């Protein structure tokens, strides 16, 4: 029995490097990217709700209500657990020339995340930082990506990651608040000073809940983070992943949902 073409074709794309995608394959991957984008980091809220198992607090009121139906004898201790709320997710996507083979697909993921979930912020990273959250929101991904491209003055140019992360810290740190999960999607090639990048990454790490770096070059078995930018940033990241394929984005999403405590 032959599987439906759409399903089998997407399955074949799971391990394919984004840099090797054709325009048709990028369009085909959209549904998978949308499904991944609906998932993200969560945090326990202050409120609680009744739960059947795993609750952290006794629910005495519910326990007594149930006891009334059993002659006043409590038979089961009811419990309450925390209400889970979305944790803010900050996506910083490198749109420099060296990331051109990957930026379009990674921005498709960012666009889907900004549209599907609350508390998502997206920034384009080049020689400067550009907030593109508003431009990326919307049901038409092509129109959204075109708006974002027009908003970024240094698209496919160079990269000054340290200065851009410094801009994120200074201009948006208070707005984003403490406790965000920050995901940087970049190959780590940086024209700036590695000392500046290290200092700004350390500052970001102190304010964020977790910092994750996705570098498509990491997919190569021979890759070593020897570039000055990547070597300076790596000590200040919690996880270092590839981000070059649908399967690697699945790994990111699984980490966001349950692997970061």
Image (cartoon, rainbow, N blue to C red):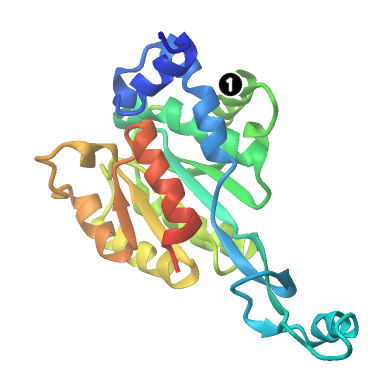
Relative to 256, say whether 44 is above or below.
below
- Would you say 18 lies left or right of 79 here? left
* Residue at image coords 66%, 39%: 116
Of 78 and 210, the residue lying toward us: 78
Horizontally, is 112 left or right of 159 in the view? right
Q: Quadrant of residue 73?
A: bottom right
Which quadrant of the figure contains the C terminus?
Answer: bottom left
* Residue 201 image position (x, y, % from top left): 37, 62
Relative to 20, is 181 above or below?
below
Is residue 219 visible in the rendered image? The answer is yes
- Tell me where residue 192 appears, x and y as whole percent: 29, 49
Q: Position of residue 46 (x, y in %)?
A: 71, 76
Query: Residue furthest toward the bottom?
Result: 73
Furthest residue toward front? 71
Of residues 261 and 191, which is closer to you in this image? 261
Residue shown at 29% from the left, 63% from the top: 198
Which residue corresponds to the image point at 29% horizontal and 53% vertical from the top-left?
240
SS class, disc 1:
helix
Location of the N terminus by quadrant is: top left
When the figure is inspected, residue 114 is found, relative to residue 33, above or below; the finding is: below
Seen in the image, is 222 located left or right of residue 236? left
Give the percent coordinates (x, y) of residue 120.
Answer: 61, 48
Q: Report the residue marked by disc 1.
A: 146
């Amino acid at each position: 029995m032959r599987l439906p073409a759409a399903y089998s074709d997407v399955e074949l794309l799971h391990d394919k490097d984004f840099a090797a995608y054709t325009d048709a394959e990028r369009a085909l991957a959209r549904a998978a990217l949308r499904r991944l984008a609906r998932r993200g980091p969560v945090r326990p809220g202050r409120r609680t709700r009744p739960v059947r198992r795993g609750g952290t607090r006794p629910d005495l009121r519910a326990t007594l209500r149930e006891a009334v139906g059993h002659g006043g004898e409590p038979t089961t201790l009811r419990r309450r657990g925390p209400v889970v709320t979305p944790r803010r997710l900050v996506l910083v996507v490198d749109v420099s020339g060296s990331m051109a083979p990957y930026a379009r697909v990674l921005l498709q993921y960012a666009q889907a995340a900004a549209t599907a979930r609350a508390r998502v912020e997206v920034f384009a990273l080049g020689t400067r930082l550009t907030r593109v959250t508003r431009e990326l929101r919307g049901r038409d991904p092509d129109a959204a990506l075109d708006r974002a491209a027009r908003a970024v003055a240094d698209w496919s140019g160079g990269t000054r990651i340290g200065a851009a992360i410094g801009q994120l810290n200074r201009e948006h740190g208070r707005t984003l608040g403490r406790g965000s999960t920050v995901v940087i999607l970049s190959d780590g090639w940086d024209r700036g000073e590695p000392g500046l990048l290290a200092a700004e990454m350390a500052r970001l790490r102190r304010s964020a809940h977790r910092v994750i770096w996705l570098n498509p070059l990491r997919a190569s078995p021979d890759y070593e983070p020897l570039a000055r930018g990547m070597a300076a940033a790596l000590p200040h990241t919690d996880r270092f992943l590839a981000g070059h394929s649908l399967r690697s984005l699945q790994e990111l999403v699984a980490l966001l949902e349950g692997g970061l405590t």
